């Protein structure tokens, strides 16, 4: 079966390209220079050209803080474009997979969120992603998969223009001073390779269309995650917990947004723990302790 991947250069897209072939799929990837995801005519043209059986959308506007002052950009990529892709897939009878986020929840429940829990985003970014989810379920519920994940990290450089949390901490660990990291935000950091593999396992298990949570097993605060990163670097660095009250980078963020993998686990699809994922990422980076 042939896959068309939109967003091949992101930290998730790159791993999807690598894993697709391991699972026996033919895959064609595009980047923003080849296809503007917000241009519905370009989307339909690439579909007509490649004639895929499955379309995976790995694009996202994920600059959470900037989205507050540029909501139109976030909505264009995370909502309108996703809806247009869903409609194009429906018109061509293509299976559609797109990724969403833990930020569709407000984090007030105090425990991991399941697929059936009611979203309530706190900021523009989460609202735009939820609008994208709603567009998919409105236009093409019969053959679409919405995969929510949390705290994704991967790739040699992370996400274009943003990097990722792990690479940022590794860089900051080598600089003087104390690291202050949020202790009140609880997440399950997810390695992009593990997420990619789980996505393809879901396809192989012939899962029914719908919303799935695919995130690392277990959860932690960003402070606890940072402590584990520092331990793996071997650098002697003081890390100090900081309670920001769920407000950082100019926006409110959910305090407890870890996700619970219920539906996929029932099919035997489960990701490794966040600790295992982090160790795998360090191995991938071929990190050498100083």
Image (cartoon, rainbow, N blue to C red):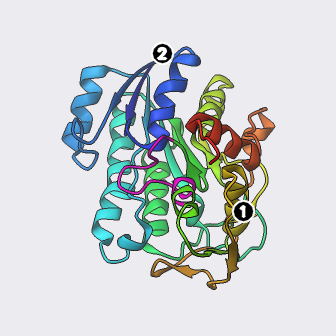
Q: Secondary structure at mark 1?
A: helix
**Relative height, residue 241 to residue 163 (above, below):** below
Q: Is residue 156 magenta?
A: yes
- Depth order, front residue of 20/203: 20
Reading the image, the residue beneath label 2 is 1
Whole-number angstrom distance, CA of label 1 to CA of label 2: 42 Å
Query: x, y (%) of residue 257?
Result: 67, 66
Reading the image, the residue beneath label 1 is 227
Query: x, y (%) of residue 53?
Result: 43, 22
Binning the other alpha carbons within 10 Å of mark 2 as few (below 14), some (14 to 19) or many (20 upward) gives: few
Q: Disc count in the image?
A: 2
**Residue 69 figure quarter:** bottom left
Q: What is the magenta range?
A: 155-168
Binning the other alpha carbons within 10 Å of mark 1 as few (below 14), some (14 to 19) or many (20 upward) gives: many
- Depth order, front residue of 189/71: 189
> Which label is found at residue 60?
none
Query: x, y (%) of residue 190?
Result: 64, 48
**Relative height, residue 184 to residue 222 (above, below):** below
- Depth order, front residue of 245/108: 245
**Relative height, residue 212 to residue 283 (above, below):** below
- Which residue is outermost to the front? 290
| Left or right: residue 33 compared with residue 204 | left
Secondary structure mostly seen in the magenta stretch? loop
Query: x, y (%) of residue 220?
Result: 75, 62
Q: Residue at coordinates 47% horizontally, 77% vertically from top-left?
A: 249
Q: Secondary structure at mark 2?
A: loop
Q: Residue at coordinates 56% horizontally, 65% vertically from top-left?
A: 103
**Relative height, residue 146 to residue 67 (above, below):** above
Q: Residue at coordinates 69% horizontally, 25% vertically from top-left?
A: 205
The answer to whether residue 116 of the structure is visible from this angle is no
The answer to whether residue 82 of the structure is visible from this angle is yes
Which of the two discs, 1 and 2, labels the residue nearer the N terminus?
A: 2
């Amino acid at each position: 079966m042939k896959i068309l991947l939109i967003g091949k250069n992101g930290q998730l897209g790159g791993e999807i390209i690598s894993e697709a072939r391991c699972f026996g799929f033919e895959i064609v990837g595009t980047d923003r220079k080849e296809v503007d995801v917000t241009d519905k005519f370009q989307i339909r043209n690439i579909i007509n050209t490649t004639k895929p059986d499955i379309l995976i959308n790995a694009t996202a506007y994920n600059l959470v803080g900037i989205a507050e002052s540029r909501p139109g950009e976030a909505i264009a990529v995370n909502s309108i474009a996703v809806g247009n892709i869903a409609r194009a897939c429906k018109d061509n009878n293509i299976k559609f997979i797109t990724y969403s986020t833990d930020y569709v929840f407000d984090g007030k429940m105090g425990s991991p969120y399941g697929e059936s829990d009611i979203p309530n985003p706190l900021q523009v970014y989460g609202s735009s992603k939820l609008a994208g989810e709603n567009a998919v379920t409105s236009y093409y519920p019969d053959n679409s998969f919405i995969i929510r994940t949390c705290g994704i990290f991967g790739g040699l450089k992370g996400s274009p223009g943003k990097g990722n949390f792990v690479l940022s901490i590794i860089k900051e660990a080598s600089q003087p001073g104390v690291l202050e990291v949020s202790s009140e935000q609880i997440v399950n950091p997810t390695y992009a390779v593990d997420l990619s593999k789980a996505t393809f396992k879901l396809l192989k298990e012939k899962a029914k269309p719908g919303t799935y949570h695919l995130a690392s097993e277990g959860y932690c605060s960003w402070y606890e995650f940072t402590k584990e990163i520092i331990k793996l670097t071997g650098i002697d660095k003081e890390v100090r917990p900081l309670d920001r009250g769920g407000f950082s980078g100019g926006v409110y963020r959910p305090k407890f947004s870890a996700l619970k993998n219920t539906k996929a686990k029932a099919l035997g699809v489960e990701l490794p723990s966040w600790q295992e994922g982090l160790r795998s990422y360090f191995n991938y980076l071929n990190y050498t302790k100083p």
